[in-house]
Amino acid sequence: MPDLVAHGVLAGLDEIADTGRDRRAGGYSRHLWQSADLELRAWFTERAERLGLNVEVDRNGNTWAWWGAPGSDAVVVGSHLDSVPGGGAYDGPLGVVSALEAVARLQAAGFTPGRPCAVLVFAEEEGSRFGVACLGSRLLSGAIDANRARALTDRAGITLGEAAATAGLDPAHLGRDQESLDRIGIFLELHVEQGRGLIDLREPLAVASSILAHGRWRLSFTGQGNHAGATPMTDRRDPMVAAAHAIVSVQQAALASPGSRATVGRIEAVPGGTNVIPSVVHAWLDARAETDAQARAVVAEITARVQAPHAGCSTSVVEDSWTSTVTFDPELAARLVRTLGGLPALAAGAGHDAGVLAARVPTAMLFVRNPTGISHSPDEFATLEDCVAGVEALDTLLRELL
Ligand code: GLV
Ligand code: MN
Ligand code: MN
């Protein structure tokens, strides 16, 4: 029944199509435990319970929907529902909706799993509220120190610990969750592709081979806050000028190291007034490269360039997060390729919860073609036909793995 299946895949995306729409930025802004995220959590719970799954929120805010009793050596399929500011409709939700759809198809076919199975939705994959990407999977796996995590703040100065308490979690229990981690036998994440790899290969699906080494750093420039009219141009210590100079250095350092990527996607002037020379400017750097050494070298070069005094300002560079190059389990990837009758392998430029979990459990990813080649933007897309191919692949894999 390809039409029904097709309708089912997009029905989930349709149901959440109005949740977290961002009129200013376009696309979606769905941030941890804020209104859109809470709505999506309720939607997921309702959807999963309709399939007879048992929904549990773990102590880090990740949501598990168990098909049958929870248990060890489970096949866990999932992704995330949060977004970047002004993100697309597919980054995260496609994986969640496809996992639910694959379970629904197996149930409709009368399939009974031979081992535990869960659909897992990770919290704060994008790091859009608290600044650290893949926060839910880092907390679960112990890849971030719980004390450090509790103290992370959002743009309003609310700590993760405070936000967790408001969401009904015990902040003291945030952090490595060995019991949940031990239940995962295999983790599988289906995700929309975020670049042009599958367009170039002319294929609808691929299996992930690796993820670039990547991290985030906060660059802060401190000058002297002052009056925009009363302060002569020659008598200023303007951190916005130092930041502008630094941003050009970021681009130059990455261009000088072929294959690396470095971006300043967020900047904040304090206090932020049109007629105020800022006292401080913060700029957030995202840097990535194929190897840890290359990514580290690019950031070292950027640090050296931005720390040379400019506009009479001082500079600090603080690492917010770091993830080494991920190589996905080659045996599991080969099993996926065999089961699906041949699939290309693709290296990912984007980070994923699967990349964090790969350090702890056998993990694999499937990518679904994105015909625009654009992501973290409302222009991200996947065709109905390719989404159906993704669900069918998950269905086939779950039959094999369960
Ligand atoms: C997540 O999408 C990331 O790589 O930033
Ligand atoms: Mn993303
Ligand atoms: Mn994602």
Image (spheres, helix red, strand yellow):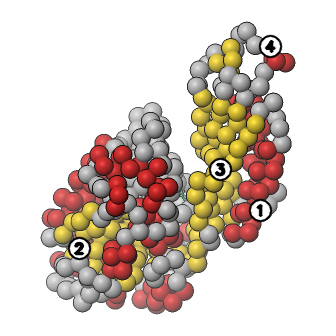
- Circle 2: is it few (<14), some (14-19), or many (20+) Cα within 10 Å? many
Q: Can residue 19 be seen in this snapshot?
A: no
Kind of residue indicated by mark 3: Val
- Measure the C-alpha gap from mark 1 to mark 2: 43 Å
Q: Amino acid at mark 4?
A: Pro
Mark sitting on residue 228: none
Q: Position of residue 105 (x, y in %)?
A: 23, 75
From what the image shows, is residue 165 above or below residue 141?
A: above
Q: Which residue is mark 3?
A: 318
Q: Identify the secondary structure beneath mark 1.
A: helix
Numbered marks: total: 4
Residue 52: quarter of image: bottom left
Residue, x 23% and y 54% (percent of image)? 43
Residue 183 appears anywhere in the view: yes
x, y percent for residue 146: 45, 60
Mark 4 element type: loop
Q: Amino acid at mark 1?
A: Ala
Circle 4 crowding by C-alpha within 10 Å: few under 14, some 14–19, many from 20: few
Q: For residue 62, what is the image quadrant?
A: bottom left
On residue 297, the disc is 1
Viewer-nearest residue: 285 or 307: 307
Identify the residue under disc 2: 66
Circle 3 SS class: strand
In the rendered structure, are the residues bearing label 1 and label 4 in contact, judged by CB atoms less than 8 Å apart?
no
Estimate the x, y position of residue 204 in percent, counting from the top left.
48, 71
